[in-house]
Image (cartoon, coloured by chain):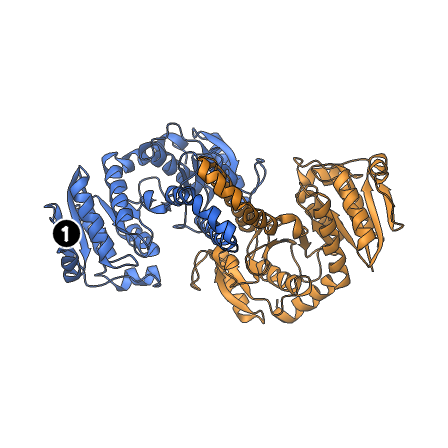
Chain colours: A blue, B orange
Amino acid sequence: MARIAVDAMGGDFGPAPAVAGAVQAATRLPGIERLYLVGHEQAIEAELRKARDIPPQIEIIHATEVVEMHESPAVAVRRKKDSSISRCVDLVKADRADAIFTAGNTGAAVAATTLKLRTLEGVERPAIAAVFPTQYRPVVLLDAGATTDCTPRMLCQFAVMGVVYAMEILRVSEPRVGLMSIGEEDAKGNETTKEAFRQMEKSSLRFVGNAESKDIYQNRVDVAVCDGFVGNVVLKTSESTAKAIRGWIREELESRLVYRVGAWLARGAFARIKERSDPSFTGGAPLLGVNGICIIGHGSSKQQAVFNGIRVATQSVDHKLNPHIVARLRDTFGNGS
Amino acid sequence: MARIAVDAMGGDFGPAPAVAGAVQAATRLPGIERLYLVGHEQAIEAELRKARDIPPQIEIIHATEVVEMHESPAVAVRRKKDSSISRCVDLVKADRADAIFTAGNTGAAVAATTLKLRTLEGVERPAIAAVFPTQYRPVVLLDAGATTDCTPRMLCQFAVMGVVYAMEILRVSEPRVGLMSIGEEDAKGNETTKEAFRQMEKSSLRFVGNAESKDIYQNRVDVAVCDGFVGNVVLKTSESTAKAIRGWIREELESRLVYRVGAWLARGAFARIKERSDPSFTGGAPLLGVNGICIIGHGSSKQQAVFNGIRVATQSVDHKLNPHIVARLRDTFGNGS
């Protein structure tokens, strides 16, 4: 049974998708004991009135402030004590909630959870795990942007967290770990990845060596590890390349009548690709390594994305993700590290 | 007038594309005073016999060894004194050639030129400039893999080299420089990029601030600067994402007859996209910052790619790329840096 705090104010579209997604989750997902909607009370109530039935697990927690997308996370967390994301974290800290879902400012979620909940035993810094849809099975890339400057040891900790997430939530048995680098040869990389390579090689991880972006798509790794700067670049480059190609294809297909006819005939194929690569089905990215569950949705999350994010949060609680991470960290690198 | 040394052995397809591309270049490009084909004499002669006329500027330089793609660059350059890439560099060092084109081991080209020719005045480390085809105009991304661990000052030097390349070779007036980072806000990035941001802001560069991959595609920057680790990741992620999407589209379009008919009608549109995004038209990536011109082609370069690479090498010599880089470095950061 899980108690979930939903940041109702964080996303680009205000409280509407958060409230609708939360109502849907409380109605349809088993195992939700309590679901807090955190944010401006009146705004949330107005959205709740649109629902046919309000599930009994739902409770509003009033918060007067919102961290906006453009705000500096560290400053916002310090100054806006009564922001919706801070109040969500407070609920976890007071053991009134087990998990958070937010589609708000990512940096603020990282800063608030790390400051107030601290990291798990054996974890120095948190990491955001992005789940990549591929033609085969989903691949976990971490860190996708929580910790930009990493030591080799932090990368090893990320690897373990990614492995546990892949096993518990994505149901991958014995996940293969690749270290994101700039060539497959052992000796390639920068100073940090070269040292991380040596440490992973000695560990009990199922380490397949250096990996490149193509290995994510070609089913060679299940968990791809890198620092938050590189991971964020990979994530955004793949998103923007995909978008640019879609735009380019659209432009070409509209340039002549015969192409437009062809595209119309094949429209079902394009719709399927769009659906399969839609990020709202992965349900947001978990922030791993903090002492609590926090799932971070895209700023543009709609109801379906919020629903899926709450689903992943519930699963993470049910599967005891964090205790597993702590235990696995002890096993993987032994006492020395 | 330019004298070009072509590494005839380096690519994946042996000397055939290098020799054919060189013959085409010597025949069709004005301003080639001499064109050395460097590599195994008999293999090159055998290829040359396939040409109708052998242009008088062509001269074979015998080299007994080849650096293979999988070899460690540093080791290969030290041990294989008579490799085709080393001999190319020797020709530049002896002032018999002005520029090199190679489709061989990238690391070996970087190591050999850096060791034997040294870097330009004011340049601490070289950078590979990758030219991205976009819907708008080409964008220079550097470093794409020569220097994996960079200081802020090296990033600033890369920026200047990229600006000069964009102006002289891509004919962009007043190129806009973006610093690859993980968000547009000034404060985002890692320790190195934050300091580089401050230095670029104070310089006379047309600095537009932090940039993300989407800015490359959306015509917000002309020059995107990052370390060689990140740049290589961007390049390979965009390539592998594009490839994965093409594969995905193909799979969906083949799944039903009506889609296949649609795809057939629209085949001209797909062919145009393929052509416009074909890397062989950009003519390889220049290695900037060494005391000589070196253009690095893709390992899979065919005749057309070699021809374009030689064209870019010739332009770089004609436009006095390196003297411009040295002068611009002095101007941009003043005496202090």
Would residue B76 be found to the left or right of residue A190 on screen?
A: right
Q: In this view, does B11 lie above or below A236?
A: above
Quadrant location of residue A28?
top left
Estimate the x, y position of residue B212 in percent, counting from the top left: 48, 57
Residue in the image at 68% along x and 53% along y = B286
Q: Mark 1 lies on which chain?
A: A
Name which residue type carries label 1.
Ala
Quadrant location of residue A205?
top left
Estimate the x, y position of residue B199 in percent, counting from the top left: 54, 66
Q: Pointer 1: what residue?
A: A51
Would residue B92 be found to the left or right of residue A177 on screen?
A: right
Residue in the image at 22% along x and 49% along y = A21
Residue B252 seen anywhere in this rendered image of the structure: no
Q: Residue furthest right?
A: B56
Estimate the x, y position of residue B96 in percent, counting from the top left: 85, 53
Q: Name the residue nearer the viewer: B120 or A294.
A: A294
Residue B311 seen anywhere in this rendered image of the structure: yes
**Dot 1: few (<14), some (14–19), or many (≥20) neighbours within 10 Å?**
few
Q: In which quarter of the image is the N terminus of chain B?
A: bottom right
Residue in the image at 32% along x and 63% along y = A75
Q: Name the residue nearer the viewer: B270 or B91.
A: B270
Q: Quadrant of the C terminus of chain B?
A: bottom right
Residue in the image at 20% along x and 53% along y = A19
